[in-house]
Image (tube, rainbow, N blue to C red):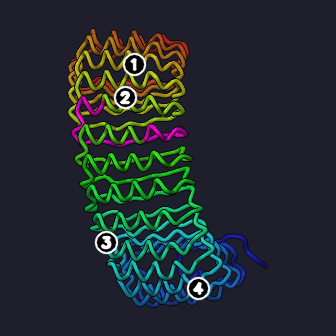
Amino acid sequence: MIQEKKYFNNIKQFLNSSLQQFQVLHIALQNCGNQIGDDGVQNLGLGLEQCTNLSNLALDLSYNKIGDKNVSDLGSCLGKCKNLQNLALNLEYNQFGLIGAQGLGFGLGNCTNLSSLDLLLSSNQIGFEGAQGLGFGLGKCTNLSNLTLDLSWNSIGDEGVQGLGSALVKCANLSNFQLDLFGNKIGDIGASGLGCDLEKFTNLFNLTLDLRYNQIGAIGGSGLGSSLGKCTNLQNLTLILDGNQIGANGTSDLGSGLGKCVNLSNLTLCLMSNQIGAIGVSGLISGLGKSTNLSNLKLNLSSNQICDEGSSSLGSGLGNCTKLSNLALYLESNQIGDEGSSSLGSGLGNLTNLSNLTLDFSRNQIGDNGAEGLGFGLGKCTYFSTLKLRLYGNQIGDNGAQCLGSGLGKCINLSNLILHISKNQIGHDGAQGLVYGLGKCTNLSNLRLDLSKNKIYQSQQLKVKCLKQKRLVALKIKSI
């Protein structure tokens, strides 16, 4: 009798079961006490060979001490599972390198019926030749439509990512692709080459590309942007480039390229700590403003010295993204003052379809005038239902808090509000004024208010004022 699904966390129990009966298997052997050992991996592989009806397998062997030979042998055994359609294999934090990666790729290349593959190999010693060999094998899985491949922290470098990308192009049916290459010493040549390969995935609708903490500069950023602009079928893109050196020119070119993705509706773009500056932000948002179908945008520009000028550019540029309904902006530690926060608030007020906003202005230089301008702008967003606003570590005083509350009080459809305004210069009068303003949000049902590390000593009175709002069903105030 065929069994539809079975879970094992013990090799002996698995080997002693009726192996030919399984269609769906989940085997969890991660972080075994004394590791599973050579014999354990070999026996596991031999057992999987006998699962002739297996179509779906999830196998977690992370955090063991598995070396090259065993990984290679495991790949060979998996290659004999001819009916396998969906495979999730986790080999993170083991001890294999070039030979293991090549052997694994060769074996998986024999799984010609695979349509979905999640392969997690981060924190091993694969190197550039291992990445190339792995890619060569996976390139034979021509029926793949969904691929998640994590090679983070494997020192694959430019050569490795180029070989990997050129081999994977043979998977012409890919529609969903996630590639994690965090911390791999990839530079401009590798990033540009990878971009050129991505152009060739003509059926790609969903792409996640994680290139955090590599060595990508302006040339690499420009190359990526140019290539992604040719992926005209892309609908959902997550691009993570934190901790590189892309700079102003690279960021501008990246934005220009992304603006050509005419079908893009969901974009997550993370560029934290990339030396972008105001000029880079202006170029970036000018390009993104041409993505007229964007409805969901998450943009992380923290720690980039964009200052008031950059923040103002963001405000004016975002006004072109008229279809935005969900927006998250992370602008922490950017030397933004009153002018920048006011201008951005004014720009956001023009987004008439915006229903959910996350805005992080933590650790900037915003004072009373900036808080007033921000509140005034946000008060025009009358369709808001959810707002998360972080103003931690600025210079906002009583007047700024009162004006912010007054502005937010005009958001008549606001039902969920998280407001972090800790570590400013707000006293009791400012807090009272803030709460008074928020009291005009007649539809507010969930409120979380963090006023800690200010100059407030009567938090109970604030809570009483908030509780007078009849619709409020969830309340949390922190003021110490």
Q: Nearer the viewer, mark 2 or mark 1?
A: 2
Which numbered disc, 1 or 4, marks the residue that appears first in the sequence?
A: 4
Quadrant for residue 259, please give it: top left
C-alpha distance separating marks 3 and 1: 45 Å
Mark carried by residue 377: 1
- Residue 55 inside the magenta-drawn segment: no
Q: Mark 1 and mark 4 in contact? Answer it, CB < 8 Å.
A: no
Residue 473 visible to the viewer: no
> Residue 428, percent across and down?
26, 12
Numbered disc 2: secondary structure: helix
Mark carried by residue 158: 3
Task: List the residue tagged with mark 2.
Answer: 315
Which numbered disc, 3 or 4, marks the residue that appears first in the sequence?
A: 4
- Label 2 crowd (10 A; few <14 / some 14-19 / many >=20): many
Name which residue type carries label 2: Gly
C-alpha distance separating marks 1 and 4: 59 Å
Name which residue type carries label 3: Asp
Give, as a single range, the part of the protein colored magenta: 288-311
